Amino acid sequence: MPHRKLRALGLHGWRTSGAILAQQLQRKGLAAALDDLLEIDCIDAPHPATGPPQPDVAANFEGPYFEWWDDHKAEDGTHTYMGWEESLDYLAAYIRERGPFDGLVGFSQGAIVSLVLAGLQRRGLALGGLPGIKFCLLFSPFQSRDPRHAAAYEGLIDCPAMVIVGEQDPFKSWSLPSAKLLKDPVVMMHRNGHSVPGADWEGVPRVRAFLEGVAAGGEADSANT
């Protein structure tokens, strides 16, 4: 008997947009390869970008551009993500009004948000009264450097998750350690850079099996590759 289609909230990267994340997932066919299993609602962050996007983003994707926060670094090295509280309130309201959502799909800054949300919700510190996050697909995630998010990482985050990183990603050394924040994550690599892989990626069957496991309510595949 076929399982129901999962719904996920799509959280875009720094100074991009929900439309850009949708295009990143669509252009190389990954969204189509998962379409029978997963519906992704890609939304804009509530804050307009406080500066220009990365040159490759500007060259390939039209604005407007948004961000989940603006990173302010103090002289003592402390990072403060300005706008985080507004983003958290916005996401909680969106999930309440447009949900339920089964999971989160995040890229780069959006993957940071996804990890923080999963960790804080598990500890009763965010998204109270909303259905639990059942899974995360994390493309090029990082660990938050804002001390306010430290509680999200107290103990392993017990949420089925895939951490997907490009072999040529210049931020690979930041992304791979984030898997250690999770309990039994699936860690996979693709051949490209700081990007979302396409339908020709050899990891697609593994992603499908992971989603099928979540939809069935059983244990998602947690063996690392």
Image (cartoon, grey):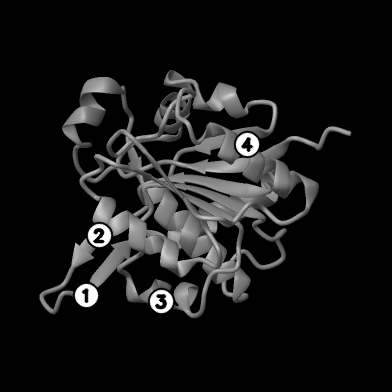
Query: Disc 4 vs disc 1: which is toward the camera?
Result: 4
**Left or right: 37 as drawn, with respect to 139:** right
Q: Inspect the image, locate mark 3, and give the three-letter code of the amino acid beneath it.
A: Ala
Question: What residue would you read off at disc 4?
Answer: 208
Vertical side of 167 occupied by 82: above or below? below
Q: Nearer the viewer, residue 14 or 164?
A: 164
What is the CA distance from the residue labelled 4 to the residue labelled 1?
39 Å
Q: Disc 2 or 1, which lies upstream in sequence?
A: 2
Question: What residue would you read off at disc 1?
Answer: 78
Q: What residue is shown at x 46% (from left), y 23% (from top)?
A: 200
What is the CA distance from the residue labelled 2 to the residue labelled 1?
10 Å
Q: Give the class, few, some or many, for how many residues have Cα within 10 Å of label 4's Cα (few <14, many ≥20).
A: some
Q: What residue is shown at x 70% (from left), y 39% (from top)?
A: 6
**Residue 100 in sight from this viewpoint:** no
Vertical side of 66 occupied by 149: above or below? below
Question: What residue would you read off at disc 2?
Answer: 71
Q: Disc 3 or 4, which lies upstream in sequence?
A: 3
Disc number placed over residue 198 in the picture, else none: none
Q: Inspect the image, locate mark 1, and give the three-letter code of the amino acid beneath it.
A: Thr
Q: Position of residue 29 (x, y in %)?
A: 49, 21
What is the CA distance from the residue labelled 2 to the residue labelled 3?
16 Å
What is the CA distance from the residue labelled 1 to the residue labelled 3?
13 Å
Question: What residue would you read off at disc 3?
Answer: 150
Q: Inspect the image, locate mark 2, and give the three-letter code of the amino acid beneath it.
A: Asp
